[in-house]
Amino acid sequence: MQETINRRGFLKIGATLATVPVFSQLSGTYSLFAKEPSDVLKNGEVITGTHWGVLKVTLKDGKVIDSKPFFNTSKIPNSLQGNTADMIYKSRVKYPMVRKSYLENPNDPKPALRGSEEFVRVSYEDAIKLVARELKKTRTQKGPASVFAGSYGWKSVGNVHNSRILLHRFMNLSGGFTGSLGDYSTGASQIIMPHVIGSIGVYEQQTSWPVILEHSNVVVLWGANPISTLKISWQVDDAQAFAYLEKLKASGKKLIIIDPRRSETIHYFDKARWISPLPNTDVAMMLGIANHLYKKGKYDKEFLETYTVGFDRFSEYLLGKTDGIDKTTAWASRICGIDEKTIQELAELFFENRTFMMSGWGMQRAHHGEQPHWMLVTLASMLGQIGLQGGGFSLGHHYSGAGVPTRKGATIGGINAASLGYFDENGKFIGTKSSGNDAASTGESWKLKVSASSFPVARIADALLHPGKTIHHNGKMITYPDIDFIYWVGGNPFSHHQNTNELVKAWKKPRTIVMNSIYWTPSAKMADIVFPATSQYERNDIAMIGDYSKHGISPMKQLVEKQFEAKDDYQIFSDLCLAYAGKELFNAYTENGKKEMDWIEEYYNVAYNTILKTPQLVTDMKPFKVFWSENKPVVFNSSMENESFVKFKDFRDDPILQPLGTPSGMIEIYSDTIAKMNYDDCKAYPSWFEPIEWLGMKQKPAEFHMLSPHPYDRLHSQQNQTRLRDTYAVANHEPIYINPKDAAKKQIKNGDTVRVFNARGEILTGAVVTDDVIEGVICIYEGVWYDPEKPGAVGSICKNGSPNLLTIDIPTSKLANGNISHTALVNIEKYTGKTLPLTAFSAPKGA
Ligand code: PGD
C-alpha cells in the first residue's frame, strides 16, 4: 500500500531521516513482529473481557457480528455490551499520519496549525524513526522533564496491552519524562481523605453488600448513580453488583437519593425518596443536618471522643462561634434549596436508624471538592455508626463493584513501568539502577528533575501555558516544567479536560505531540504524529474480573485481524526502543524479546502458582494451555469471611491496636496538618465555601447550572461513535436535559437544537424537556467527542455538544488541585442558525 503515499512527501521523509542508524533493524534482525500465520477464529464464539463485562462474541467469516454478556446475573440491562463490531470497524485511524508542516520541518513545525492542517500518510518505519529522533532531540535540547507522558485515560482492560503503562515503560527506559499526579475521577477526595481517615477511601473495598442488605435500615445514595456507573469497571466488570441493587430494591428498605437530577438510579428505585438540592450545595445541607443533631443532642458523643479528633473545634464553626454564622437548618435551606423540615427529618431519620451513607464522586468534582466527603465523614462520625454492621459511610459502592465480596483466589501479574534507563556518552543504553548497573550514574540528576516536575493531572493546560509557574499542592510547592513534547495513549483529553478552548490554546505550545490512537478522536486530530493502534479486540491479552471482588480471570482472545495498518502499543513502543537506542533498549523493554503470549502465560502463572502453593484456595484453575484453549473465564470460590466484611470494624474494635493512618490514628475532623498549610481555600475542618459559579451567587455570569455527569450510554468518550448514539442523540447532537419551566421560558421544545454558551465557549445540543432536572439546572453528559466547526480554532462552536467547552479549568483548592467539572453556569437558547454537519466521527483532512 506504499504506493498510495504521496511520493514527494515520502522522499522528503526518507532524506530527513537518513541519519537514524537503526532503520534496517526495525524490519529485520530484532523485530518481534514479523507477520506470522494468523490463528484467529473465523467463525464461532470467542470469550473476551471488557470494562463493561465478560462478553461472548460471535464471529462470521472473520467479522464480529454480535456480542452478549457472559454472566447473566441480573435483569438490569447494560447497553454497552452489544457494540463490539462498531468498536472495531468505526472511525478508525488506518495508517500512520503526520501533520504536513511537522513532516516538512520538525524544527519549525508551526504548532499554531495543529488541528486545522492536513495530515500526510507515512510508512510505519518512517513514523517510528521520526518519533525516536524528535524525542531524543527534545531530551537533549530541553531535558527529559520537557517530555510529558502523564497520558491520563481509561484505556482498555488487559494486563499486557496496558497502553499507559507501556508508554511509561518506554519513557522510563529511554530516559525519563514528566508524569501526572492523581486522576480526574477523585482528584479532591484522594488527597483530602488520607488526612481524614488515613487512606484514600475511594479505591478500596467497601462494606459488603450482604451486610448492608441484612443490617441497614436506611440507605442513602448521596450524589451516586450506580445504575449508570456500575455498568463499567476499571478492570473487567464482574456483573455482580447489579444483582445486589436488585436485592436492595426488593428489600423495601428506606432509600434516600440525594441528587439535583432524577438520575437513572432514581428511576430504577421508583419508591426511593428523591431529595434534590441545588448543585454544589451538599456541604451546606450536611452542615444543616449536623447543626440540628448537635442542638438536639442527638449525636454520639462517645464515638466522637473515642474515635475522632477535633470535633470541638469543628463545632465552634458549626455553631458560628468562629465566623458569626450559625449553620442552622434555615441557613442550610437558603443555600441548598431544600426546606428546613426535610433537612430536620433527614437528620432524625439518620440518627434513629442504622443508616448507611454511600457517596458518589460527582460532588467532589466541584469547586472546593475536598469538603463534601470530609463533611460526610464528620456527619457519619456524629451518627456514630462507622464500623458497625450496616452503618457508616462509603465512598465507593457506585464504582467498579466495590462491596461485592472478595472471592478466595489469586491475582495475575501485569506489565510494569520499569525503572529509569541510563545511557553512556555515546547514547548507548547501559541499563537501569534496578538492573544493578553502577555505571548508571550520569542520569541521576535527570531522575530528580523528572520526578520533581510531575504535577496534578487536571492542571495540564495551566502547566502548558505557564511553564515555570509554581503552585501549591497538598503542603508542597510544584514548579511546572517547560513541556515541549507530549505523548498520549489510552486517553482523550479533548473530551475529558475542562475549558476546551483553553486546552486548544495550550496544545499549541509544545513542538511535538504524538498519539497512538485507535480512532480519530478529537485528541488524535490535535496531534502531529498519529500511530494507528489496535483495539483490544485485535490482540491477545488476559485480565482480572472484578476490581474488588477478584471474581476470576478472563481470557481475552484476539477476535479479528489487526485492522488496516494498526499496530499494538507494545509493538510501537518496542520498535521505538529499537529506533531510539538499538537492541539493548529493545531487549530491556521486551525482556529479551517476549511476545504477547509469553507475557500472558507468565501473568496467568503468577496466579496459578499462588493457587498451587495455597491448598486452602480451592479452585478449578487449570494449567495455562488448558485455560487458553478452553475459551472460558476462571471463576474463584466465594468466601464466607469476606461476605461479612465491615469496613472500619477493626478500628472500631480496637482504635489503639488498629489505628487509622492519620497522624492521630483517629478520624480527623480537625487536621493539624492541613491547618499548618494555611490555605485560604481549605481550612482545618470541613467548611462551606461558595463555589466560583453557582445559582446562589449575587451576580451570576450565566443563568443555569450545568451538570455533566458520567454518561449512561458511553464509558466517558468510549462508544460515542457506535450505534448507541442513534438511540440518544437529538437533532444529531448530544442531548441537553432541561426542566419544562425553563424550556417554556426560553421557548425551547423537545427535539430543538439548543445553543449552550458562556464566556468560555459554545456548543450545540438537542433538547429533551423533562422534569428529571430541577429548575435552573441543565444536564449534558460528559464524554462527547469535541467537534469544532473550525478545527484547531480557539472559540469555535462544538457541533457534537461537548460540555467541557463550558466548564471551568481551575483547581478545587490549593490542597488537592482536582478538576471542578460540575461547577459551571451556562446560558441556553434555541438555535436558529444554519445546520452545521457533524464531523466528530470522520477522519481529518488528508487521512
Ligand atoms: P475515555 O473516553 O475513557 O476518557 O477521560 P478519559 O480520557 O479516560 O478515553 C480513553 C481513550 O483511550 C479512548 O479514546 C480509547 O479509544 C482509548 N484507548 C482505549 N484502549 C486503548 C489502547 O489499547 N491503546 C490506545 N492507544 N488507546 C486506547 C475520562 C475522565 O473524564 C474521567 S476518568 C473523569 S472521572 C472525568 N469526569 C468528568 C465529568 O464528570 N464531567 C466533565 N465535564 N468532564 C469529566 N472529565 C473526566
Image (cartoon, rainbow, N blue to C red):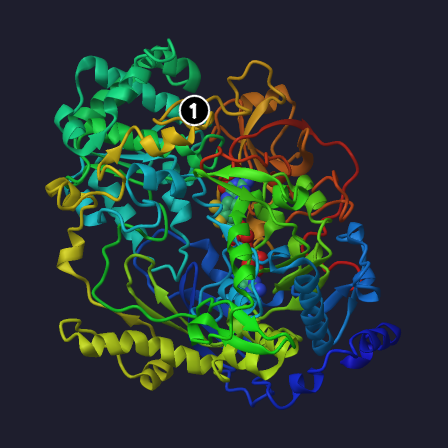
Q: Residue 286, how many percent across, how many down? A: 33, 24
Above or below: residue 454 compared with residue 434: above
Q: Residue 282, how many percent across, how many down? A: 39, 26
Query: The N terminus appears in which quarter of the rendering?
Result: bottom right
From the image, tell me which residue sits under label 1: 281
Residue at 59 percent of width and 35 percent of height? 807
Residue at 25 percent of width and 26 percent of height? 310
| Picture quadrant where residue 51 is located | bottom left
Left or right of 342 in this view: 408 = left
Residue found at the very far right of the displayed protein: 8
Residue found at the very far top of the displayed protein: 324
Residue 57 visible to the viewer? yes
Q: Alpha-carbon neighbours of circle 1 within 10 Å: few (<14), some, or many (≥20)?
A: many
Left or right of 781 in this view: 416 = left
Q: Residue 189, how many percent across, how many down? A: 39, 40
Query: The C terminus appears in which quarter of the rendering?
Result: bottom right
Helix, strand or loop status at disc 1: loop
Numbered-mark total: 1
Residue at 75 percent of width and 65 percent of height? 98
Residue 560 visible to the viewer? no
| Picture quadrant where residue 46 is located | bottom left
Viewer-proximal residue among 447 and 204: 447
Residue at 70 percent of width and 58 percent of height? 527
Q: Residue 820, how many percent across, how many down? A: 52, 35
Viewer-proximal residue among 167 and 619: 167
Q: Is mark 1 within 8 Å of ligand 1?
A: no
The kind of residue on which mark 1 rests is Thr
Left or right of 832 in this view: 341 = left
Viewer-proximal residue among 616 and 71: 616
Viewer-proximal residue among 638 and 835: 638
